[in-house]
Amino acid sequence: MLAVFPDACDAVRAADAAREALGDFAWPADCDVTLSIVLHTGRWSGDAQRPAAATALSRVMILAKVAEPGQVLVSQATASMLEGDAVAARLRSLGERALPQFDEPIRLYALTVP
C-alpha cells in the first residue's frame, strides 16, 4: 500500500495508528501478521510516469525491501523533515547503507514505539 502525506509528522502519526490498529485487532491464534512501514520524503507530482515521482516511488520500494518485519524504517530525507519536532527523539539511527537508486549511502532510522 502506498500513501502520500503533506507533512512528515502526518506520516508518522499514520504509521503509529497503523501499528496500533494491527496490534489491537483480534487475529486468529494461528495467524502471524507483521507490518513493515517505510517513511521517505521525495517530490511527488501525482503522476508515476514523471521522473520525480518515479524516483521517489522507486526509492520507497528499495527501502521496503530492507525494512524488517514490524519496523518503521525512516529515510534520512524524512528524518531531516522531522528535525525540531518531538517525534525526532523517537528516531534510532541504524547507520548508513549503500542502496541501489541512491547516489550515495544514506542514513536510515527506525521509529521507536511511543
Image: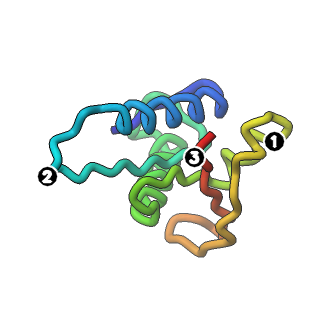
Per the rendering, the mark at residue 20 is: none
Q: Earlier in the sequence, mark 2 or mark 1?
A: 2
Q: Amino acid at mark 3?
A: His
- Above or below: residue 52 compared with residue 14: below
The residue tagged 3 is: 40
The residue tagged 2 is: 30
81 vs 32, left or right, is right
> x and y percent of residue 61 in the render?
41, 54
The image quadrant where one finds the N terminus is: top left
27 vs 63, left or right, is left
Marks 3 and 2, Cα distance to the nearest angstrom? Answer: 33 Å
> x and y percent of residue 76 in the render?
69, 55
> x and y percent of residue 86 in the render?
79, 35
Per the rendering, the mark at residue 83 is: 1
- Above or below: residue 96 compared with residue 16: below
The image quadrant where one finds the C terminus is: top right
Residue appearing at x 27%, y 49% in the figure: 33
Considering the numbered disc 2 on the image, is that residue within a helix, a strand or a loop? loop
Q: Amino acid at mark 2?
A: Asp
Of tags 3 and 2, which is closer to the observer? 2
Residue appearing at x 51%, y 29% in the figure: 14
Q: Amino acid at mark 1?
A: Glu
